[in-house]
Amino acid sequence: MKLLMINSWEELLTAAAIGIMVVFSVLFVLVLLFELFQVIVLKVAKKKVVKSGIDVDKIKDIPANEIAAISMALYLYLDSMHDEESNVLTIKRIERRYSPWNSKIYGLNNLHR
């Protein structure tokens, strides 16, 4: 059973046009959903800011370099909460017994005799 019974160029072009229209319509719907999601998230965030009592106008007046400094300080503070590690790797060689299972001389490509 074939999904598309295409017998001529006209049917091929029609099927291709329908496929392209389906792809672009689905992409358009996805863009609309992402935009709607963005609007919903921003409304919820504004409600939380208003509920917490923070003045939104003061937040807009903070320069970008101060925001970067605060973000870096928070990152360093939260990163320092983890355990300190020595960052030294120790590699010990383990001697294994001989096993023919991983030996290359018994491979399938060994056709010479």
Image (tube, rainbow, N blue to C red):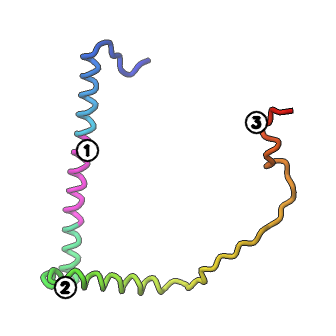
What type is the residue that disc 3 sits on? Asn
Residues packed near mark 1 inside 10 Å, few (<14), some (14 to 19) or many (20 plus): few
Amino acid type of the residue tagged 1 in the rendering: Leu
Please give left or right for residue 60 compared with residue 92 in the image.
left
Would you name the residue on which mark 2 appears? 53
The percent coordinates of residue 101 (x first, y second) are 81, 47
Q: Main secondary structure of the magenta part?
A: helix
Q: Nearer the viewer, mark 1 or mark 3?
A: 3
Q: Secondary structure at mark 2?
A: loop
Q: Which residue is mark 1?
A: 27
Residue 74: give x, y in percent of width and height: 36, 84
Q: Secondary structure at mark 3?
A: loop
Q: Which residues are magenta?
A: 25-41
x, y percent for residue 112: 83, 33
Residue at figure coordinates x 19%, y 74% from the top left:
47
Q: CA distance from mark 2 to mark 3?
A: 75 Å
Q: Residue at x 32, y 81 (%)?
A: 71
Q: Nearer the viewer, mark 1 or mark 2?
A: 1
Name the amino acid, label 2. Answer: Gly
Q: Residue furthest front?
A: 112
